[in-house]
Amino acid sequence: MQLRHSQRRAAKMRLALQGASGSGKTYSSLLIAHGMTSDWSKIAVIDTENGSADLYAHLGTYNVLSLSEPYNPEKYIDAIGICESAGMEVIIIDSISHCWDYLLDFHANLQGNSFANWAKVTPRQNAFIQRILNSSCHVICTMRSKQEYVLNERNGKMIPEKVGLKAVQRDNVDYEFTIVFDVNMKHYALASKDRTELFAGKAEFPLTEQVGMQILGWCNQCRTQSSANYGTSYPAGRVAQ
């Protein structure tokens, strides 16, 4: 072990978009990815949504890798490797909710003690998440939210509107991502988590290529290591107490 100064290095983005079906997660992911690469041929979509990624082929000639059932973690892991080997710069996994659905079904069908059986599930989920985190590419993941309808007043009438709730994935999976965007049915987003501080606290906004460009700029920022200073001096504006 060695103590060292903190140092800002170029990073690979780990981004999640969560929202209800129809909120525009796939389309928004593609726009962000293109903003990060400016080259559609360097974008790959791992598609578990029955070909929904091909609906936006008019945007550009990005790559699609279609997965079929069962949506087990190992299949996702192999797909990420294929995209990396093909020289992709951004991988969109649309969506990772199918993987969690698979694992829940797998757990439900195991014999024996339900609690103890999680020992057969958790390592597979962890391996999948670690593969995302360790990828040599930028990774954008979409997550489906559980849906619910609420009544909102519009022009004097109560209109039911679909809203997104909790993402269909393991609890606290959002901790693993650098940014998490909550996408509503108007295709606008709020950052529910943002380590970059680019979008935290902002009013809802559309997800565009410019968002991808901002994210890429943050990823490419580097700070050279500063000289050591273990004396009694204080940063400007600070006074010793």
Image: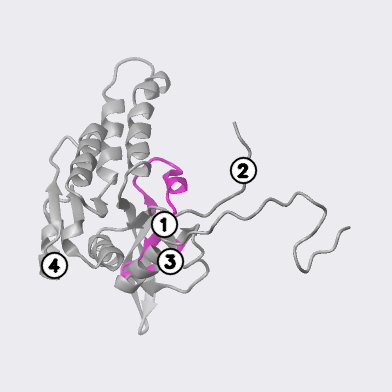
As drawn, which residue projects farthest toward the right?
Answer: 241
Q: Are marks 3 and 4 in contact (CB under 8 Å)?
A: no
Q: Residues within 10 Å of mark 1 (few under 14, many from 20)?
A: many
Point out the frontmost of discs 2 and 3.
2
Question: What residue is disc 1 on?
Answer: 180
Q: CA distance from mark 3 to mark 1?
A: 8 Å
* Kind of residue at disc 1: Val
Residue 148 coordinates in the image, percent (x, y): 34, 57
As drawn, which residue projects farthest toward the bottom?
Answer: 155
User: Considering the numbered disc 1 on the image, is that residue within a helix, a strand or a loop?
Assistant: strand
Reading the chain from its start, which is encountered first: label 3 or label 4?
4
- Part of the protein shown in magenta: 166-191
Question: What residue is disc 2 on?
Answer: 4
Reading the chain from its start, which is encountered first: label 2 or label 3?
2
Question: What residue is disc 3 on?
Answer: 190
Reading the chain from its start, which is encountered first: label 4 or label 1?
4
* Kind of residue at disc 2: Arg
In the image shown, does 152 or 50 lie closer to the viewer? 50
Q: CA distance from mark 3 to mark 4?
A: 26 Å
Q: CA distance from mark 4 to mark 2?
A: 44 Å
The answer, for residue 208, to whether it is visible in the render is no
Q: Is residue 73 magenta?
A: no
